[in-house]
Image (spheres, rainbow, N blue to C red):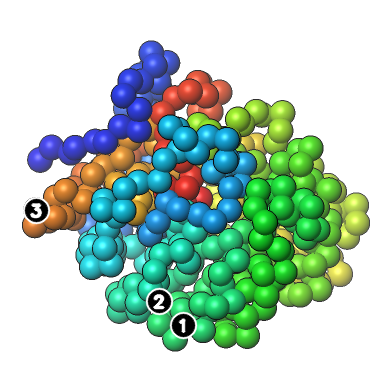
Amino acid sequence: MSIALVSTDRLLSRRSVALAQLLASTPSVVSAESPQGLPLRDRLARPLTDLRLSVTDRCNFRCPYCMPRSKLGPVVAPMQRSRMLDFDELVRIASAFVELGVTKIRITGGEPLLRRDLAQLVKMLSSLSVDDLCLTTNGSLLKGQARALVDAGLRRVTVSLDALDEPTFRRMTDSQTSIAKVLEGIDMARRCGLEPVKINMVVQRGVNEHSVLPMAQWARSEGLELRYIEYMDVGRTNGWREEDVFTAAEIRDKIHQQWPVEPVETADTPATAQRFRYRDGQGEFGIIASVSRPFCRGCTRARVSSYGELYPCLFASTGLDLATPLRHGQELRPLITKLWRQRGDRYSELRSDVPSYSPRPEMSAIGG
C-alpha cells in the first residue's frame, strides 16, 4: 500500500535530502509487531498514545513566534474553508487512532474556540474510549464557552499565556485583546471544573524573560500548573535565532534565586517537561526544553491538521493525507500504522544539521 505524502514545500534542499536520508538510516529497535500489536511503536520504540487534533488554522492572536502578522500574506495563508474536515470526519479520524492505541486526545488550532459549535465536537469525541480529552487555547474566548465544553465532556484545559502585564501581553499576542479576558477565562474554567488548569508560557530573550518571576508568583498564589517553554523554530515564519532562546537552565536559575527549587523525579524517560517543586511547598512548575534538552526519544504524539494531514513530528517536512482516503471510504488504520512504524523523526536532536529554510508546517496548522 502506498502512502501519499503532501509536501509543505515543493523542493527540499540538498541538506534536507541528506537529513531525510539520515533519518531513513536510523536503525530500527523494535519489530514491526509488538507482542500484543498495540500500542503501535515506531523505529525508536516510541508508542503512539497521544493525538493532537487541530480543528482550525485560524487565530484571533498574531503571536510573533507562531503566526506573525508580517508573514500572513503568501507564506501563511489559512486554508480554504471547504477543505476543512467536518466534525464527523474529525471523529472518524480520531476513532482510527483510538483503535490503534491512542489514549489521549488534545484539541488544538489555531485557536480552537474559533471553531463554531466546538462543544458539539467535544461531545462526539467524549464517546471514544480515551483516558484524557483536553484542549489548548489562548483563553480569550474561554469565559463564554467553558461551561458548554465541560457539559460536553471536556476534562482539562491548557491556556497559552506569556505575560501578565498589559504591554508585554499585547506585544506577545499582537492583538488588542485585554489580558483581563484571558484571566476571566481561566477563572471560569476553574469554576466549571476544568482542573488542573495548565498555563504554557513561551519565553523569548529580550521580549518577555522579565515575566518569568511574575508568572511564577501568580501561578504559586493561584495554585496553577505553569510550564515554561523555550522559544522554538516551529514553521519557517517566526524569524527564529538560537540567541533568542532563554534556556531552561536560565529559567530555572532565575526562579531558584527567588524561591529555592528542587527537581521532581519522574518515571518518564525522557520526560517532555523537566519538573521542579518549590522547597517551601508552594507548588511545582515545568520547563519544556526542546532546544537545550531535546526529548525526541520520549515523544508519543501524532498531529492531524484541520484539513486532514497527519504529521509524525512538530517539525516534519511532509504530512500524510488522510482526508482523501477517508472521503473515498478507505480504511485509515493501515495508513496510520505504516507511517508510524516507519517513523524515525528526531528533529530537535538534529537541529544543527537542518537549514532554517527546510520545509515544515506552521504551528498554527498543527498546534504546539
**Up/down of 10 relative to 105, above or below:** above
Which residue bears the numbered disc 3? 328
Q: Is mark 3 on a helix, strand or loop?
A: loop
Sort mark 1 into few (<14), some (14-19) or many (20+) by Cα contacts within 10 Å.
Answer: some
What residue type is disc 3 on? His
Lateral position of residue 338 relative to residue 72, left or right: left
x and y percentages locating residue 313 in the rendered image: 41, 42
Q: Quadrant of residue 243?
A: top right
Cβ–Cβ below 8 Å for labels 2 and 1? yes
Lateral position of residue 282 relative to residue 202, left or right: right
x and y percentages locating residue 97 in the rendered image: 28, 60
What residue type is disc 2 on? Ala
Visible residue check, residue 38: no
- Residue lying at 22% horizontally and 57% vertically, measured from the top left: 37
The mark found on residue 133 in the picture is none
x and y percentages locating residue 314 in the rendered image: 45, 43
What residue type is disc 1 on? Ala
- Residue lying at 84% horizontally and 56% vertically, measured from the top left: 213
In the rendered image, the quadrant that contains the N terminus is: top left
Q: Earlier in the sequence, mark 1 or mark 3?
A: 1
**Up/down of 66 relative to 176, above or below:** above
Count of numbered marks: 3
Q: Which of marks 2 and 3 is nearer the N terminus?
A: 2
The mark found on residue 119 in the picture is 2
- Residue lying at 77% horizontally and 46% vertically, measured from the top left: 208
Which residue bears the numbered disc 1? 148
Which residue sits furthest right?
Answer: 258
